[in-house]
Amino acid sequence: MMGRADAVLGVAGRIGAAVLLAAFVLFLVAPVVVIVLMSFTDQLYLTFPPTRFALRWYASAWEQSRWLRAAWNSIQIGTATALASVALGTLSALAVTRGGRRWLLPFGSLVVAPMMLPHVIIAIGLYPTMLDLGLSGSYAAVVIGHTVVATPLVFTTVAAALRGYDHALELAARTLGANGWRTFRFVTLPMIAGGLLIGGIFAFAVSFDELMLALFLAGPRTETLPRLLWEHLAQSVTPTIAAVATLILAFTLLLLVAAETLRRRKAVEPPP
Amino acid sequence: MTRGASVEFAGVSKQYGLVTALRPTSLVIAQGEFFAFLGPSGSGKSTLLGTVAGFIPPSEGRVLIEGSDVTAMPPHRRNIGMVFQNYALFPYLTVAQNIAFPLRMRRLPRGEIARRVDRALEMVRLGDFGGRMPAQLSGGQQQRVALARAAVYDPPLLLMDEPLGALDKTLREEMQEELRQFHRVVGATILYVTHDQQEAAAMADRMAIMNHGAVEQAGPPRDLYARPENSFVARFLGEANVLRVVAADPVAAGRLHLRTEEGPALLACGSPPAGIACIRPEDIAIAEAPIERENCFRGRIVDIVHVAGSIRYSVAIAANCTLSVRVRSDRRTAVLPMDAAVHVGWDAQDALVLPS
């Protein structure tokens, strides 16, 4: 069957498209596959392809308290980051979409700016600030750093949720006797709950995978999983790294699937 | 039955920067009145309603409900019911929960809420629909839920912003009847915003015609139709043939001889200043033979439109003067043919003489 795309592309185009697809798979997906396969090796060093299937490096990571502590740190920092970004992102989104002040509109771009900025620049800015505040190496420092880069994600999803329904719902609640807070609590919040949850999951995922800010802002007591991975890469390359990387990958994928499922369920709901 | 609240606008105006949404407006609406604000979009009618609801703080002037100044009162304390064009039902709540919302906000006891919700559902004939979600209802049913929700706490004042705008024509006419019935039963004052002149005329006790942020004229629909004060009102309500007057000479007491820009000279009742003359299409008689009226012209039929119950002829009586003529028709009415040479005529009292 000759599809429309085929008709437009022609033979050369189809070959080109196939090459592009192959390159995409090779460069984006293959490294992930390699890492996952390598994590199941029984050797003492990273080998590919693995000779025999074994879980000894997963067991090894589990037995080293440093990995466990780093994982626990990452979860704590990710949770705090998610909560802080949801609060800040939601408030900013409310201000920009419902504030009714024209001067607030450019504020939206300002909130999103950290998403475009290289993390290293944010890190360079935050590092001396945290030193001055005596927060360097603390949980607070990492959470603040991660909140800076995660808030834009919450802002974008919540602002989209707010723009997705008729403002008259809130006006109706006001006439029906709800004051500002109760209007938010009983109308705005239920309407944006999906966007809020998805934004929170994204914020957690960003924090969980973030390296640069953790390098600058975390200390030995607060080191995160990506930071510990980085250290191991620089010092002793063992298959433990592959095992931990595979676990992080699986966890992040799980978060993305959760967010996507939520998003779809929201999309299926009939419009108000 | 609730006693309706009176509403007074005292010099209410609204500016957005350099844009004037509403020019200073003063108006008094009586207790229990069904009052419609009618005008094209951007005429300021929704702005006026917004100042009553409390969403739009007026730039100047005061809004009074039952004689007390509510200009600075937040919307949730005004005890007003409002119905929105797109119903604004909460999509995550059932029909019954939607109607219970204002009662919960008023912290009524649970039993009382259930009792009142049931009564409200009965009132809008949706007794079995309490457990449904709004999205499972038709447009007309959703509108009835919105109505029940706005009325369940017996507010003395109800605001309606194009409530039937999203419904199709048949349903709209049914709902008009239902709203009038509702008004008779509930007794609340209703302020009703619409751009549909038939809808306003069919339902309202009185109405205000709005244009460019100001009230052009207010009164009972019949008065506005019969005695418009300017050409905007004359044209906005029903149809009107408008001729521009270039000279007006008094010929007898209250009678003028008018010469018009379009050509025809005519006799009309009225007094100077005379800027325009309006003749309603249904006031003009049409026949092949000359017509015994004070104004009679020869012309040619250039267009024929059949509408339910009547025929509208376009008759050219001069080079740049075509009159719209409407005659009632039934199955036995003989239709004049296209291009036919005809006479059209009307009496002096059928023409309205307006300043502009």
Image (cartoon, rainbow, N blue to C red):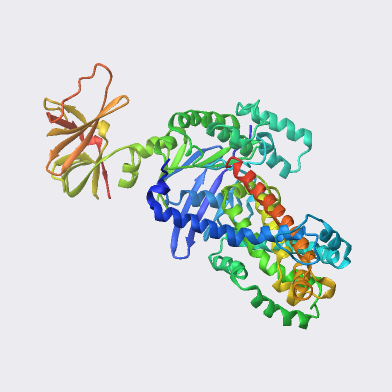
Please determine whether, in this image, residue B76 is positioned above or below residue B253. Answer: below
Across and down, in percent, residue A144 comes to 74, 70
The quarter of the rendered structure image containing the N terminus of chain A is: top left
Please determine whether, in this image, residue B352 is positioned above or below residue B44. Answer: above
Q: Nearer the viewer, residue B24 or A239?
A: A239
Q: Residue at x 60, y 41 (%)?
A: A268
Residue placed farthest to the front in the image? Answer: A51
Across and down, in percent, residue B65 comes to 59, 48
Q: Nearer the viewer, residue B201 or B7?
A: B201
Please determine whether, in this image, residue A112 is positioned above or below residue A175. Answer: below
Q: Nearer the viewer, residue A217 or B3?
A: A217
Q: Quadrant of residue A38?
A: bottom right
Residue A57 visible: yes
Residue placed farthest to the top in the image? Answer: B332
Q: Is residue B116 left or right of residue B327?
A: right
Q: Is residue B205 left or right of residue B262?
A: right
